[in-house]
Amino acid sequence: MKDMKLSNIQKESEKIKLKKEINEFEDLKAKSLLKLGIMTFDKIRKNEIVDKDFDEICEEIKKFDIEIYTKYMQIYKFEKENSKTTCECGYVAFKNEKFCPQCGKSLIKEEKPSIICPNCSQEIDEDSIFCTCCGNRVSIEKEYNEEVYCEDNELDFYIEKEELEEDFVEKEGREFLKVHQDNNME
């Protein structure tokens, strides 16, 4: 009877060890799936993967990102309101002071110009290359003439305004360089 109890205790102990190992492997699997999900989402965001099955969940993630970003911006504004302004001369100013009493410089900081991200509609700094909320590349449309002509001894072409997108220019530039590198090698 005593041997039987001992063997039952050993079996239970072995089961507990196995369950612990299973939990450890499940944790490792969950971490790997999380990494895979993050990598996949990043590729979808960069349009390296295009699959309509992911659209609904990506939109949901985008909404979460906007909420997280908005909350962080609210915290930033609270911290900014409570922080003291320090003049270039070192004077620490009170909240209501507009000019430094020591050197006379303005203590009012100019706000940076901003733009609205076309992907997530959040306000970001004008000089941003990527959106600080959703991470998408922000392309600022610059004013161009309706038609652009470029004439050179070796180059003569016409580009419509619609074709002046980054991918087109980058592709054409690579082809131009390739042709000219090949010509220079000969």
Image (spheres, rainbow, N blue to C red):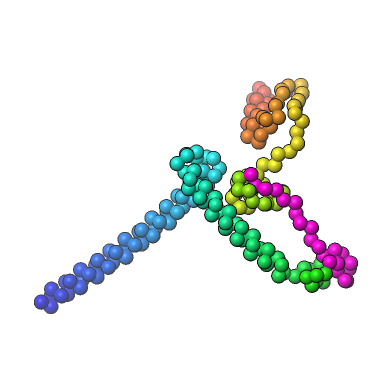
Q: Left of 107 or right of it: where is 50?
A: left
Is residue 113 one of those drawn in magenta? yes
Residue 30, located in which quarter of the rendered image?
bottom left
Q: Residue at x 13, y 75 (%)?
A: 3
Residue 175 visible here: yes
Q: Left of 87 or right of it: where is 66?
A: left
Picture coordinates of residue 18 (x, y %)? 28, 64
Is residue 36 one of those drawn in magenta? no
Count every numbered label the image shows and give the total.
0
Report the magenta residues as a range. 98-118
Image quarter of the N terminus = bottom left
Picture coordinates of residue 61 (x, y %)? 51, 51
Q: Nearer the viewer, residue 125 or 70?
A: 70
Residue 83, located in which quarter of the rendered image?
bottom right
Residue 39 visible here: no
Q: Is residue 11 above or below residue 171?
A: below
Looking at the image, which residue sits at the far bottom?
2
Q: Nearer the viewer, residue 42 or 153?
A: 42
Q: Residue at x 77, y 30 (%)?
A: 145
Q: Left of 22 or right of it: where is 77?
A: right
Majority SS type along the magenta span: loop
Q: Residue at x 75, y 70 (%)?
A: 84
Image quarter of the C terminus = top right
Q: Residue at x 12, y 78 (%)?
A: 2
Picture coordinates of residue 5 (x, y %)? 15, 75
Q: Nearer the viewer, residue 111 or 91?
A: 111
Residue 154, located in which quarter of the rendered image?
top right
Q: Nearer the viewer, residue 29 or 146?
A: 146
Picture coordinates of residue 64 (x, y %)? 54, 54
